Image (spheres, rainbow, N blue to C red):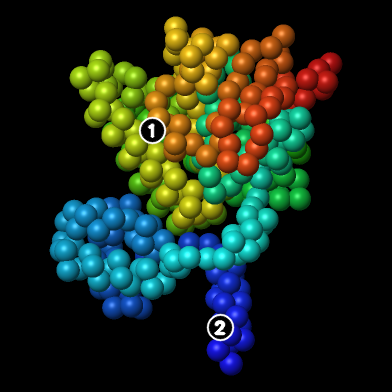
Amino acid sequence: MSQASQQSQQQEDDEDLLGLTGPMLVSKLQEAGITPQDCKKLAEAGLHTVESVAFTPKKVLAGIKGISDQKADKIIAEAQKIVPMGFKSASVIHAMRSELVHITTGSSQLDTLLGGGIETGSITELFGEFRTGKSQICHTLAVTCQLPTSMGGGEGKCLYIDTEGTFRPVRLLAVAERYGLEGEDVLNNVAYARAYNADHQNQLLIQASALMAESRFSLLIVDSATALYRTDFNGRGELSARQSHLGKFLRTLLRLADEFGIAVVVTNQVMSSPDAQASMYAGNDKKPIGGNIMAHASTTRLQLKKGRGNTRVCRIYDSPCLPESEGHFAILAHGIGDPEEEV
């Protein structure tokens, strides 16, 4: 009985884990004895789901006005009873990953390079010089994420945080026309916000969490994640504060990707590197800013380079499952496409 029953129980647990779809609203904690007032305080602090509460350290919860250490312990204990946070068998993880949705970039060559497109549930970083196609890819993804999964989409809305003022709705309309989508509907499905400083950029993620708890989103874009940090923090004297602030921002992005299963795409600027020959960017005198904090937070890092004419080169620099290789794509009137699509 013991071994057979244990195997049976393990299978049932695995099936339960596979059956969990979508985040649970924080109000569900009321069923576990947490008061509505405390649930409201959690939501006001940006914790809109049970998953976000379970993933949050105790000291952060205790820092919320009206939540004592004792309350924080109880809230975390109840949240972790609802959200499975222990070990799972590798077969369960494999089954979960096999069902991951990939969002098409608009270029079949680029999709092939990425193993199907932009992966949901993780952070993809695009870095490169100006005019390499970072923002153009973001504009195309803002539309393709709304497509049905059968067409390479994510069947969800898009959140777009713009720090450089490069967002242009007219580009979304051009991509929408390419895929036969209604332009007005596409624009209505993109929630846009302009970030004006690093603190504001962080606050927008709290609003983003609230929106995701109310409606289905499949993509979050931050273009660019690091631009404001270069101006808000100056010199080596503020380097530690900058990296700490950036680390918290990226940690929140990763939490949102885990919590809601969305794809997170961030763009990054580059800087000149005189000692590039001695680094992983050998042969290229430009390297992404953000240091190790940025490198460790990004699941997949893609370097974009200029090619001939409207052709651009995408190189995989870091990925847990994709080999280092490169492919080509083009910036066309209707968004990102393959170079041979040129007329």
Q: Residues within 10 Å of mark 2 (few under 14, many from 20)?
A: few
Between 192 and 32, the residue placed more toward the observer is 32
Q: Is residue 327 above or below residue 69?
A: above
Identity of the residue drawn at 35% across and 46% down: 206
Query: Residue 169, percent across and down?
Result: 57, 29
The secondary structure type at the circle numbered 2 is helix
- Residue type at mark 2 is Gln
Q: Quadrant of residue 274?
A: top left
Query: Residue 333, percent across and down?
Result: 71, 21
Identity of the residue drawn at 49% across and 18% down: 279
Between 140 and 64, the residue placed more toward the observer is 64
Q: Is residue 178 above or below residue 236?
A: below
Of badges 2 and 1, the one in the foreground is 2
Where does label 1 land, which residue? 293
- Residue type at mark 1 is Ile
The secondary structure type at the circle numbered 1 is helix
Specify whether residue 258 is in view: yes
Query: Residue 35, percent across and down?
Result: 25, 73
Going from N to C along the chain, the mark reached first, 2 or 1, is 2
Where does label 2 land, which residue? 6
Q: Quadrant of residue 30?
A: bottom left
Query: Residue 264, percent across and down?
Result: 52, 41
Identity of the residue drawn at 58% across and 72% down: 14
Q: Is residue 215 above or below residue 337?
A: below
**With 215 as the anchor, is 29 left or right in this view?**
left
Tell me the quarter of the image containing the C terminus.
top right
Specify whether residue 147 is in view: no
What is the C-alpha distance between the residues marked 2 and 1? 42 Å
